[in-house]
Image: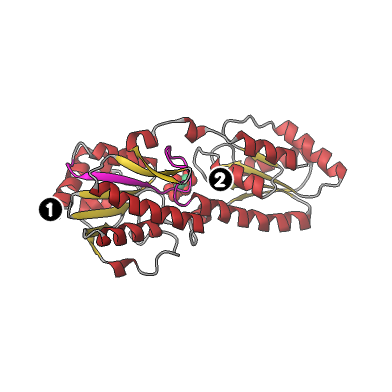
Amino acid sequence: MRRIAVLCSGGDGPGMNAAIRSVVRCAIYRKLEVFGVTRGYDGLIKGDLEEMFATSVSNILTRGGTILKTARSKDFMTLEGRKKAAQVLKKHKIDGLVVIGGNGSFRGAHIFKEDWPGRIIGIPGTIDNDICGSDYTIGADTAVATALDAIDKIRDTCTSMERIYVVEVMGRHQPFIAVRVGLSGGAEDVLVPDTEYDIERMCDDIKAGRKRGKISWIIIVSEGVASAKEVADLITEKTGFETRATVLGHVQRGGSPSALDRMLASRMGAAAVEALLKGETDKMVGIEADEVRLVGLKEACEHSPKKVKLNRELYNITKILAT
Ligand code: F6P
């Protein structure tokens, strides 16, 4: 192995830059040449790559987003697209590829091993934390902190104006962000996949809370479970209390990565380079119980309990504390 490439794919997440930095500098430390691919698989198909040096990744550790840019590639889903990507890698004599992304990106990488003889290692980078084989994905911890910061601010206005707020957080089908901000933000209710939400019960709770003198109420809705606006409108209709809906949206994907995300990214980048050197392929670098491990790319993005599992302990404590 002499020359490797690194790309980001799918939705960006804070800490991707830290992972790129780690891959580039660890590769150079191990006497490899390293190329950065711009705009994920789309850039690979177009031959949009250039050599990176230790200074190419200076001062990016603290920055959100990805200096390599990222994309969701439709062309890479076609055999023709993947063949073009394989030709580009062959032309540049690249024999190892590091893919930083989520489950869609890993599915693509897993299929790509049929079209290209080089080695492929994935690094889990997504705010959704929906990859099996790693306790955390890069970006998820920062996204929770960002959403929590916004929710704390909403609490200020919520309390001042004695209103009810329904706040939608991201996470695709995964309740990771919702349950964590629910517990750490003192939310009164959390609507997440896997739980039945009963609007009548919620409204009765709100009315009973008001009678006890409870003046603010924040309900977290995990993306895809319900529309924050519809829930807010129903609450106003059924309780008569002023209710507002806020969708936090893409703000959760940006910002400077947390210490945890920088650590994960730096460790995973180093492990990805070592895995390539050891001849590993079709694997993802995960960290479980603080130990770096390799997991099959297929296994990492398979529909497993991790993807849909709600952490009942967190959910139950949130409900108990919200009195
Ligand atoms: O996968 C990351 C994520 O931010 C999800 O939480 C969300 O469902 C989706 O990406 C949003 O995608 P887009 O950036 O294409 O709107």
The answer to whether residue 13 is seen in the rendering is: no
**Who comes first in sequence, dot 2 or dot 1?**
1
Other-residue count near label 1 (Cα within 10 Å), few / some / many at <14 / 14–19 / ≥20: few
Residue nearer the viewer, 312 or 197:
312
- Mark 1 lies on a secondary structure that is helix
Q: Quadrant of residue 237?
A: top right
Badge 2 element: helix
Amino acid carrying label 2: it is: Ile
Q: Is residue 289 left or right of residue 199?
A: left
Q: x, y (%) of residue 320?
A: 74, 38
Residue 91 screen position, x and y as percent: 12, 53
Q: Residue sitting at 42 percent across and 38 percent down? A: 133
Magenta region's main secondary structure?
loop
Reading the image, the residue beneath label 1 is 91
For the question of whether residue 135 can be seen, the reply is: yes
Which residues fall within the magenta stretch? 116-139
Q: Position of residue 68 (x, y in %)?
A: 33, 59
- Which residue is denoted by mark 2 in the rendering? 177
Magenta-drawn stretch contains 167: no
- Identify the image quadrant of residue 158: bottom right
Quadrant in which the C terminus appears: top right
- Whole-Å distance between the Cαs marked 2 and 1? 42 Å
